[in-house]
Amino acid sequence: MRTADRIANLPPYLFAEIDRKKEAKQAQGIDVISLGIGDPDQPTPDNIVDAMAQAIRNPANHRYPSYYGAKRYREACSEWMRRRFEVDVDPDDEVVALIGSKEGIAHIFLAFVDPGDYTLVPGCGYPVYHTGGILSGGLSHFMPMTEENDFLADFESTPSDVLAKAKMMFLSYPNNPTSAIANEEYFDKAIAFAKEHDLLIVHDNAYSEIGFDGYRPSSFLERPGAKDVAIELFSCSKAYNMTGWRVAFAAGNSTAIKALGTVKSNIDSGVFTAIQDAAIEAMLGPQDITFQLSEIYQRRRDTVVEALANIGMHARTPKGTIYVWARVPEGYTSAQFASKVLDEANVIVAAGTAYGPSGEGYIRISLATPDDRLTEAIERIENSL
Ligand SMILES: Cc1ncc(COP(=O)(O)O)c(C=O)c1O
């Protein structure tokens, strides 16, 4: 059996590797605490589950879904954008339903990247920005991200030969894994840069609903001219504790949305329509859940940042996302420190380098863990140092 080179070219999928190590420890009866994966520990709210229970009994929902999303779903996405950000997107040609934003990230490459084309990828970011490129025969240029530069991906330093072959640039703020946020000036510069170099910007706003200390993330599409060059991805996963449901959407530039829809219509058959109905309830029903979740993660953030400071590890206090990005102690690489913590404290943290080259020197701690387990994990790390 001979598989394609593109499979061999993929790096090992980060979370699969973490799961494998965890299972090996658990098979030995060891209690492992995972701070590795950003999968909310709280259930989906009742009003959304109830909407699903009703929707699943509707026989019309049992048939093939629309490739692009049911009209009522696309209208709900558009209404949510208006209520939440005062951004107007046309449900008919500026919105497409996604089977989770991961699916949209992977498929946008097939719509824009030919073999040998470059994609500008954040120096550390969600791994599929890079692996999606590999699967489509494209190349990644990692834009440097440094703490001194507030982890804003430096697109301006991209060499001109790379730019000549680049079609697409990923940005994502609030950022996974660094939790950095971007200001309007940075977004405006990115829009001007994309116009100058004829690039599509894909702004991944997976953490749009999680903000701390009164901060609420904005939409990239709020910026003037954004729709000329960008699409933005939103997901119910983290906003409404719906990671398992696989429902999200892309909104923005109609040419890009149409191209993505064309790819999807040849590969998948859309999101189960009952799930779209549940997502409509999530987006247009009561929004208290997003504030409650932000409160929970903020409390956990405070616990972790303070505990890390007490053991001499530096971490910035994030204003959003469900991660704390901490510098590893002197003398360790990210991978060495993550593996020491797993071996000696039975705690899983993600090595920063798993997210790209700018992640060296850092680990990512996920706050999607119950408070008592989080406290215990930090105590274990302290005892292992
Ligand atoms: C930045 C970012 N984008 C996209 C995703 C994928 O989310 P979804 O569940 O919508 O596919 C994640 C998941 O952790 C993420 O962190």
Image (cartoon, rainbow, N blue to C red):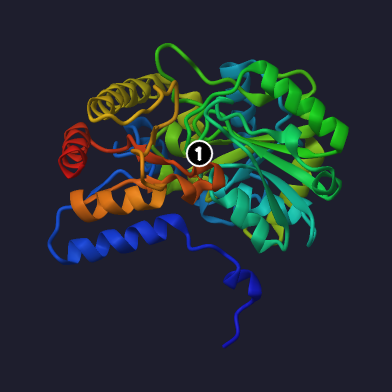
- Relative to 155, residue 319 above or below: above
Task: Give the quarter of the figure containing the N terminus.
Answer: bottom right
Q: Identify which residue, 172 or 63, lies in the foreground.
A: 172
- Residue at the spot 55% in from the left edge and 48% down from the top edge: 102
Up-down relation of residue 191 to residue 231 (above or below): above
Decide if residue 267 is in sight here: no
Q: Residue at x 75, y 32 (%)?
A: 156
Position of residue 335 measured from the top left corner of the image (x, y, whole percent): 39, 52
**Where's residue 101, x and y in %?**
56, 44
Left/right placement of residue 248 relative to residue 262 reads left
Quarter placement of the C terminus: top left
Residue 196 image point, x, y percent: 87, 32
* Element marked by disc 1: helix
Residue 159's image quarter? top right
Which residue in the rendered view is the most extreme toward the bottom? 1
Say what amino acid the circle numbered 1 marks.
Answer: Asp
Density class for disc 1 (Cα within 10 Å; few <14, some 14-19, many ≥20) is many
Q: Looking at this view, is 142 or 29 the one in front?
A: 142
Q: Which residue is mark 1?
A: 277
Picture coordinates of residue 320, whole percent (x, y): 45, 24
Up/down of 218 relative to 155, above or below: above
- Left or right placement of residue 159 versus residue 339 in this view: right
**Residue 220, quarter of picture:** top right
